[in-house]
Amino acid sequence: MRAPIGDGSPYGVASPAAPERPTPTIYALATGAPPAAIAIVRVSGPRAIAALRALTAGDLPAARRMTRVRLVEPTTHDPLDDALAVVFPAPASVTGDDLVELHLHGGVAVVDGVLAALGGLGLTAAGPGAFTRRAFDNGKVDLGQVEAFGDLVAAETGTQRRAALSRTGSRLAERVAAWRAALIGVRSDVEATLDFADEDHVAPDLTPSDRVILSALLVELASARADADRAGRLRDGIVVAITGPVNAGKSTLLNALARRDAAMVSPLPGTTRDTIEVRVVLAGVPVTLIDTAGLRESDDALEVEGIRRGRARAASADLVIAMGSEPAVPSAIWVEGKSDLGPCGAGWRDGALHLSAMTGDGVEMLERELIARVGSLTSGEAPLVAHRWQAAAIVDAVVAIESAIGAGDAVVAAEELRVATHSLARLVGRVSSDDILDGIFARFCIGK
Amino acid sequence: MQHYDVIVVGGGHAGCEAAAAGARIGMRVALVSRSAGDIGMLSCNPAIGGLGKGHLIREIDAFDGLIGRVGDAAALQFRLLNRSKGPAVQGPRAQVDRRRYRAAMASAIAAEANIVVVAAEVTGLTTSGRNVTGVETTVGRLRAAAVVVTTGTFLAATLHHGRATSHGGRVGEAPATALATAIAALGLPRGRFKTGTPPRLDGRTIDWGSLDLQFGDADPTTLSDAAVAASPPHLACGMTRTTAASHAIVRAHLADTPTYGGDVVGRGPRYCPSLEDKVVRFGDRDGHNIFLEPEGFDDATIYPNGISTALPPPVQAALVATIPGLERASIVQPGYAVEYDYVDPRALTPALMVRGRPGLFLAGQINGTTGYEEAAGQGLIAGINAARFAGGDEPIHLDRATSYLGVMIDDLTTLGVSEPYRMFTSRAEFRLSLRIDNAGERLTPRGIDAGVVGRDRAARFAAAQAKRDAVRTLLGTLAATPAAVARGGVAVNQDGVVRSAGDWLAHPAVDWTIASRVWPELAAVDPATAAVVAVDARYGVYLARQAGEIAAFRADEALRLADGIAFDRIPGVSPEMAERLDAARPAMFGAAVRVAGVTPGALTSLLAHARRAA
């Protein structure tokens, strides 16, 4: 365990004289590249506090209080900076280890000097994610939270930020705990029929109320599963494909939406041989617009390949803008271009939006429609899960619960429910058979 | 001074199995019991086996152990529990004649030439350095390479009849006080548990005519798979219930009981509660079932299972009179509670040897368990490993995927106990693979390797295995179309796909009878072989999935953690996590995963450490 109090450390924790646990003490510049107004250097690990003492030539601020310190080079006592320091003693720190934050003047030489001094003390320069890894190792965060932190740091838009931030807390853990509790209740019933068959007051196999609980659970899991798709769209953006026959004006529309010349636009049929992609932000959500090659028969091998790819991309798109003819997919937005060439101008007529990408007439109406559609694809409560492995765990649980409901044999139902519990546990933690027995004994009188 | 290879202290279920296992391996064993007449005594109810427990019996049997054979010899009736459920959770149970059981166990012990029964009380342990090298007894000092202590509920035991307390481990018998002191001197972590027993009734004073009777099965499933077919014995059990009047009496006298009066500190089992506990915890119930179990063919004593109580004896008489059929029943011996010391089983290795005390093994209720079968199972493993220790061999280790024995030992040594530990089928995550029909196939080869299986059983096993293998091969070669299967008299989906007989048997509607119509050669397969092969086929999909899980589980289990591993010095293991791991001292990485409250992060770090060390 830790070194005993009495080594002169105000926190009663490890000092350089104490036996060194082999946990490395890591450090890194936590803010952007200097020069900047301030730069924050973080030091985490059993030697973090000792390192601060070395840098302050003996002075240590009180725990969790930002304090002005004079930093010096430990051996030469050469001044490094007049800085602010905060000490978070373990385990009440973000990493779970002793953690020191140095708020420096953000000059290149200041930052370099401090980092060099820390390296000179034998500490380890942190690699990417090293601080979060320490938090995970110390049980401060689960895997889902780790990924949410990653998403938060990578968030480019406000909507992405809100979605990621909502998952850095314990919301998922709480929901999974509730699902698990429901499953364990049902499993307790089933196990009771298996282990206490000769007792009275033990219902047969899956009771009607168990079936109700499982059905409700399936609904919740399906919605969480859909969350993963929604969160994926938030994180990776929505794909909107523009489809239509050759020369319908797809590239022109793309350019109008992107307000720059992303695609090569020409009046000749078949100019766009491959797909062109442009990223825009609509309603806080990144949207990838795809201009597909014109959908026409062709004997140009290159063009045929372009058409094939375009169709594949359009098929996997979240949203389709169909130009030039009534779309086969009802959810697609039907757009008729070149309204400047007709007599009626821009506007919605017979389910189609008539616009002119050339003049910009009606493009704003399309943007409004797109924003509404994007909003409905991504809105709702902040998503609970966001990653493929989480979605997979939920799917496994759903399949197992459905099999349990359909099982004719209580032992098989119990086995499927066991698998379901473990699949859910994969989202956060683990489960032991004692939980099941606790559930049984809390609600039954078992006498034999 | 007498020299042995193994000394077994105690002649109950654990002690008898331990001594017999050591003797079968070829070691010279001293079985020390206060009186030779105590060997094989059933202190609680006159029944062996049940759900989960029947599995343990079959597994002990697979190692050629005693409890199944002896139980069969003493049976009054056999019942296979969970007949209506899947085969994985069916467990055999036998009501037994108490005197015949004791006699059969005594003769089984006497039949082992390697066992010397020493009638004496053990008063201390002798040590050499940290090694335990023998015992001090009232008839002198005995030396051995290994000592197995199986003192049941006798360690520092107190009996409670109402608020009256006395020292004793079983009614009329003194506690093991000197040995308790010796165990305490070793510094082992201990706790206190409570158990109880109902009043015994005179069957001649029970109004049997007014009661429902429960008979045994006509085609009995015996405890041991070696039992020869005989006409089944069939003494009936009676069934009755407590009444509102019974509960009123219990409520009026709660303060007179040791538990609610405040005399008992030890925790009792939730699943074998006293009537007091049932009335307090399940106050809304208007009655609780009672099974009236006969204690023997020539014995009028009845064991009323379900009303364990430590009410004062006069109150027990009033209580019994409120129960239908027992209005005029007389009590032969009042019920009582017993409180005793157990050793925290996390102090043991999976071999059931005390960590840091080479040569000292503990088995049975001393490890915080309850039940004959749980005790016998630990006795078997401790006996085998004591013999192997004496012979300089590595201990055998049964993991959770092999057996209920493995599940029990892992639960005990990894998680410890918070109440007396009883086996349930739900404790086994690989339940579909751990069945009574395949106990021999799972474990007898392990037993043969360890030298604990006698020649007869080994030969019988080899013959049975050859038959199973032949039938499995046959099931893989026989095939049929859905149309052909339908001609066997069952509706199946006519998808035209030709499937093997093994695949068809996985279909819920296709049982062995149907299969025998489709493929007449299957009709000749003997029922025991057909049963195990058919169940394997029926659960095939699940067994395959579990096989995958077992492989992953074994990969973790294979990572051994060094015995003296300093968890607090592993990078990434926080002091709190290190403390939890230190209490459990998991021997394998897989066991560390099961220690409560250890975070995935700490486990990741431990895994990395274990892999580096491996």
Image (cartoon, coloured by chain):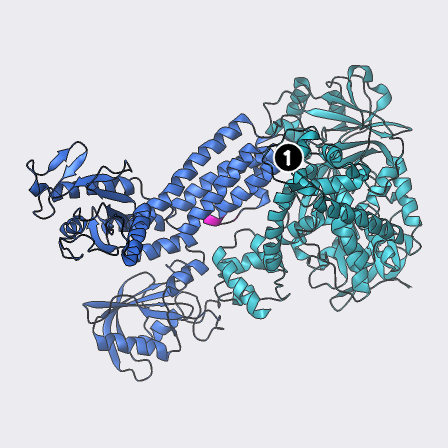
Instruction: Quadrant for residue B21, please give it.
Output: bottom right
Q: Is residue A36 above or below residue B582?
A: below
- Where is residue A89 drawn, in percent x and y? 38, 62
Q: Is residue A429 part of the magenta span, yes or no?
A: yes
Please name the predominant secondary structure of the magenta segment in the image: loop
Residue placed most toward the observer, B35 or B388: B388
| Chain letter behind tag 1 | B
| Front-lying residue, A426 or B330 | A426
Q: Is residue B336 visible?
A: yes
Q: Position of residue A372 (x, y in %)?
A: 21, 39
Residue B46 placement, left or right of B398: right
Does residue B190 lie above or below A104 as drawn? above
- On screen, residue B304 versus residue A16, left or right, reads right
Q: Quadrant of residue B215?
A: top right
Q: Residue furthest left?
A: A343
Identified by mark 1, the residue type is Pro
Q: Name the residue nearer the viewer: A80 or B126.
A: A80
Q: Which residue is mark 1?
A: B482
Q: What is the letter of the cyan chain?
A: B
Residue A272 position in % (x across, y down)? 21, 55
Display colour for chain A = blue
Q: Which residues are magenta?
A: A426-430
Residue B147 in view (yes/no): no
Residue B281's x, y, as percent?
60, 30
Q: Quadrant of residue B518?
A: top right
Q: Residue at x 19, y 41 (%)?
A: A324
Compared to A441, does B144 lie above or below? Answer: below
* Residue B130 included in the magenta stretch of the image: no
